Amino acid sequence: MDKIKLTGMEFKGYHGCLPQEREQGQVFLVDLELGLELRAAGVSDDLEKTVNYAEVFEQVRAILEGEPCLLIEAVAEKIAARVLADFSPVQELSVTVHKPEAPIAGRFRDASVTITRVRHE
């Protein structure tokens, strides 16, 4: 399966379990890997035969900057569901939501979750 990847998408969101996370917000990063057939797009050089990743970016933005979730697991599920619903060529995807400013007492580089979902027809 061919892949389209969007990595390091950065948004400010208000997701988290703690009141200060929901009031002050923080930076979230998202990596997305879409599995789909790209041969027709590559041969024809036709955008209609692939997925417009600018549109995917805007869908991810709407979720990250929209209604807050308590868990980044829920954010990842929303992204996966939206992409599968709105972009029919996508057969599978992996979503990683990074929360580098997570309220953890101690030194760490990143906190993240990764989910993989497959289209079932």
Image (cartoon, rainbow, N blue to C red):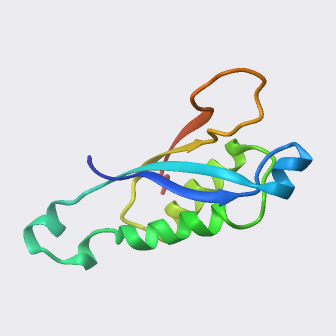
23 or 2: nearer the eye?
23
Identity of the residue drawn at 54% across and 69% down: 59
Q: Position of residue 11 (x, y in %)?
A: 59, 59
Which corner quadrant of the image does residue 48 belong to?
Answer: bottom left
120 or 111: nearer the eye?
111
Q: Position of residue 37 (x, y in %)?
A: 25, 57
Query: Looking at the picture, does residue 103 appear above or below residue 39?
Result: above
Q: Position of residue 77 (x, y in %)?
A: 64, 50
Classify residue 29 as left or right of residue 73: left
Q: Position of residue 19 (x, y in %)?
A: 91, 48
Query: Looking at the picture, does residue 80 appear above or below residue 62?
Result: above
Query: Looking at the picture, does residue 88 appear above or below residue 105?
Result: below
Identity of the residue drawn at 55% across and 49% down: 29
In this rendering, the count of numbered labels is 0
Identity of the residue drawn at 21% across and 60% down: 38
Identity of the residue drawn at 65% across and 59% down: 12
Classify residue 92 as left or right of residue 72: left
Residue at the far right in the pictured view: 19
Classify residue 105 as left or right of residue 99: right
Classify residue 120 as left or right of residue 108: left
Residue at the far left in the pictured view: 43
Query: Looking at the picture, does residue 90 appear above or below residue 33?
Result: below
Which corner quadrant of the image does residue 63 belong to?
Answer: bottom right
